[in-house]
Amino acid sequence: MSDPDDSPPEAVPQRSVSIRHAALRGAVVSCFVLVSVALVRGQGDLWLLLWAAIAVLAGLAVAGPKRRLTGGVRAQTERPQRSSIAEAVLAQIPDPVILVDQRAVVLEANKAAFTLLAGLKPSHPLSFALRSPDVLDGIQTVLETGEPMKVEYSERIPTERTFEVHIGPLQTDVSHAEFKAGVVLFFRDLTSARRLEAMRADFVANASHELRTPLASVLGFIETIQGPARDDLKARERFLEIMKGQAERMKRLIDDLLSLSRIEMRAHLSPTQTVDLASIVAQMVETLSPLARERNVVIEARFPDRPAVVLGDRDELLRVAENLIENAVKYGESGGKVDVEVAHAGPSHGEAGPHIVFDVRDYGPGIAPEHLPRLTERFYRADAAQSRDKGGTGLGLAIVKHIVNRHRGHFDIASELGQGARFTVTLPEAGASR
């Protein structure tokens, strides 16, 4: 029996050259992609250039003279060698990167790209997963002109996100037809930057409006104490107490504005930790029990016989429970009772799978129907005077709404005049299919 290595002398070198060329092609493509991404980001990322060098070295190592494969395996290994190198390098890029050919068919993509576009599949047209005329037209323009360009891509489900898409030509000397011409798409996430801009604008507008009244009050009392009431000890004590209350109001307002801004900054990032919503609500019921006793309100709580586990941020869910229960105690105290319940539920709001429901109900005066649609707006108050008297900032329900949205849940408010109000938070149970 002949040894597999006893083939004709010219066969092995020819096959070895083919394998070396395949490995080098993979290295060249990977290197080109990384350098293109580094340059297109405009940051000169050293780590991307380092990976480009590693890709070239890996290709040279694979293409060394001692690398010999039999002819029967060549067709099966040539493509995997090139793909494995490209995929390994692309996996190290944290931002979504997609390679398409001249027909806009997906050649390669990294994990971040598959996470961003659920319908993205190799060897399928990009248009199947990305419904953006601007991006698709940009690919065609780059293919025709050979010049890179930038377009903006936005998605609104499940949360609003904005990307700047850098589209650059991919042209190499590789002989494979699929790499003769193509395009590299690099997605740069602008969501945080846009939210930061909006947060600054909102903070200036809202803070300047809401802080004007207490600040004017404090300044007025200071002038009075320095002038007519300079020697009036009783008046000074009374004015200082009022000034303290106004200062505390400004502090609460600033704290709520900062909390709301932090929540909005992370609105596009879903929580990944599992928490027991029932234990969170039970903790907050115990914390707010002294406040309820002071106002002669009884809190009746009901919890399920098994944990109510959701994917959530514990601190944020504590804030939701605090705001809803505290509001029910303060604004519904005339009813003398507040019902708090956490329960398991089935499909909800058109979404399949089990859900967890957190419900807070008071028996106070209720809310007029014309106010219900606007209660979660910033600084909106059904009764502004009553809200200020009770220390409210007008941001509590807005914070609840944004936290619930970040947790991919739903927040509902129902009320009738004279019948109290019900506030319901519905969250998908951990492990449930959305």
Image (cartoon, rainbow, N blue to C red):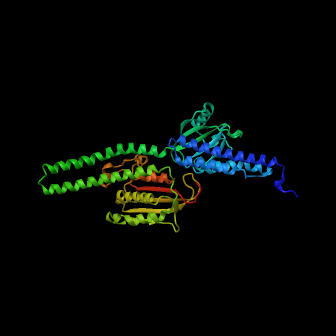
Residue with the most extreme bottom position: 305
Is residue 398 visible from the viewing direction of this image? no
Where residue 336 sits, quadrant-wise, is bottom left
Residue 117 lies, in percent from the top left, at 59, 46
Q: Quadrant of the N terminus?
A: bottom right
Could you tell me how many numbered marks the image carries? 0
Is residue 133 visible from the viewing direction of this image? yes
Residue closest to the eye, 2 or 244: 2
Please tell me which residue is depicted at 57% across the width and 56% down the height of the picture. Answer: 347
Residue with the most extreme left position: 231
Please tell me which residue is depicted at 47% across the width and 58% down the height of the picture. Answer: 313
Residue 28 lies, in percent from the top left, at 64, 44
**On screen, 244 above or below 208?**
below
Horizontal arrangement in the rendering, residue 165 relative to residue 58 (left or right): left
Horizontal arrangement in the rendering, residue 243 relative to residue 279 (left or right): left
Residue with the most extreme top position: 145
Residue 107 lies, in percent from the top left, at 66, 44
Where residue 172 sits, quadrant-wise, is top right
Q: Quadrant of the C terminus?
A: bottom right
**On screen, 132 above or below 421?**
above
Residue 119 lies, in percent from the top left, at 63, 46
